[in-house]
Image (tube, rainbow, N blue to C red):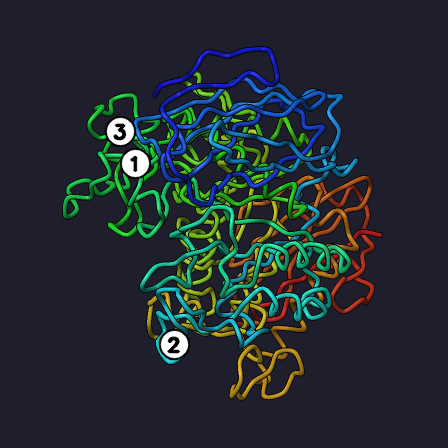
Amino acid sequence: MKKTQSFLALTTAFTLFNSTASFAITASPENWWVGMQNDSLQVMLYDNNIANKTWQMMPYKGVEFKGVTTTNNPNYAFLDLTISDNAKAGTLTFKAEDGTEFTYPLNARDKQSANRHGFTNKDTLYLINPDRFVNGDPNNDTVAGMKEPANPSFKGGRHGGDIQGVINSLDYLENLGVTQLWLTPVLENDMPSYSYHGYAITDFYKVDPRMGSNSLYKTLSAEAKEHGIGLVMDMVLNHFGSSHQWMADMPTADWVNFDGKFENGKNATSHARQTIQDPHASQYDKRQFNDGWFVESMPDLNQRQPLLSTYLIQNAIWWIEYANLSGIRVDTYSYSDKAFLADWTKAIMTEYPNFNIVGEEWTTNPAIASYWQRGKVNQDGYTSDLPSVMDFSLQEALIQALNEEESWNTGWVKVYQSLANDFLYADTDNILVFADNHDMSRVYTELGQDLAKTKLAMTLLLTTRGIPQIYYGTELLLDNTPSNDHGDIRIDFPGGFKGQKANAFTGKGLSADQQEMLASMKKLLKLRQEKPALSEGRLMHFSPKQGVYSYVREHNGQTVLVILNKNQQAIDWDLSYMQEALKGNNKGRDLISEKRVDLAAPIRLKAMQARLIELE
């Protein structure tokens, strides 16, 4: 990398090479804002031989042109700017000696932007694969010039769901009771196949035209907030799509790991995430995990490259500002360089102190997952600014608990043991809990298409500690039996596409079981909003016995007992073991039936029943 000398004069020209003819200049990011916490900005310019130009910036109060960074590729130039606190919104003008000129917008920032609040344990996230949710605009199903057309009959193809479909569904989502939307990536994925999933991004600043547009995504955020719903963006820092222009014209020689070569799988990732924490790990194994590619169509980004690191940090901040986000979910979190991850999270949380970011670390070992959470004192001294992690340990334990017979080491004890490991985490209130997601078999499928088990699972999920996440259609018992194919897991949402027999939005064609599950979920989500103890309360649980797992949520004098009966028959349950929670109070009210309960006597637990009892 080559960097020019910095000068203080705003109009100083930076002579790099001899100028040549130019085509349309692409600037990334396309704009910025005044009043940001970090006063530095680096703008990537892309054009034929743009590094050969001599640039000057026309005088602009409060903005200093620091210099131009060039690389071994003359088609890229990086403008370095400092934007002071007294800079006003307006337009910067840059001119080259050959007459080339371009303008760069500096926008006014929303006054409350820095103080925005991210998602918390008061929220419930609803995870959507947009392509499989609702087709709100059939006109964009196939877009001329893009590599993959719509193919709804192929489970691995694009089905036509889009951002407009999500907007059209906001009344349904508000009525359901969710408060945050997490959409799998909606950015451009101009790949020849399987582009619907969104994780092979080919433009980090552009919404895929088959999903909508940047402005429509911004509209979704605004309209969702009118329904009391925030927007969480799914970001990918580790890799990108091989059809991105970078693979044809890399900004630097070290932009992609392993010299930009997959080599028939030789440079594939090992997925051995434990090498990050392993004190005995070899450097070879660490590199193979961090630098290895997922697949050939997803080249692995080298975040140690300073220009790329800055690009990714600014890209995240740009989307937060532009779309008014309330959170970020980071795909394949630990696969990226860990020093970069510390810089990336710190930059965002410094800009937005009350924001939230959850990282996907797919491990059932809480010792590894907790390593990444902010506030954790790690043995190797690593400091993270990532507020939230995903609880794969509890997800696995929940499925096992409901499928296994009860014994001293099977059944409910799996959940109990998973939660007992919470001492490893710095902040157990800020952990994302879930029963399934877009990368695993659906909970209803995993539980043998058993309605009662699924209701128990979702009751626990929505009443335990942490931030619950629901996968779209769980409230309707969507099922991928007998397949475990991702295309079947990411099934079309009922009522979202023409020709479907069932319609979740009207209730037409829903089975009795689906209606019962939907009603149960609505009730639980309503209770989460009405009863702070269920979302924010201190958790105290009791060792499972006789097929019953029980716990207490307590917050500011409000106490709710949660008692989960996995037995196939009704039982009378003595609560005397819970006296430290009852504190002599023998009167309660069942939050589901809304009937009074005498806690001095054994309470009746129906087969496979969850009871939520608030102390009076």
The residues bearing labels 1 and 3 have C-alpha atoms spaced at a distance of: 17 Å
Percent across and percent down for residue 320 are 62, 42
Q: Is residue 497 above or below residue 577?
A: below
Q: Describe the element under mark 3 as helix, strand or loop.
A: helix
The residues bearing labels 1 and 2 have C-alpha atoms spaced at a distance of: 32 Å
Q: Describe the element under mark 2 as helix, strand or loop.
A: loop
Asked which quadrant contains residue 88, the reply is: top right
Query: Which amino acid does the dot numbered 3 rest on?
Result: Lys
Residue drawn at point x = 26 percent, y = 50 percent: 295
Return the residue at label 2: 151
Residue drawn at point x = 53 percent, y = 80 percent: 497
Foreground mark, 2 or 3, reads 2
Q: Which mark is residue 286?
A: 3
Return the residue at label 1: 256
Asked which quadrant contains residue 352, the reply is: top right
Contact (Cβ within 8 Å) of mark 1 with mark 2: no
Mark 2 closeness class: few <14, some 14–19, many ≥20 residues within 10 Å: some
Of 451 and 22, which appears nearest the observer?
Answer: 22
Residue 461 makes an appearance in the image: no
User: Sequence order check: which comes first, mark 1 or mark 2?
Assistant: 2
Q: Is residue 607 above or below residue 292?
A: below
Query: Which amino acid does the dot numbered 2 rest on?
Result: Asn
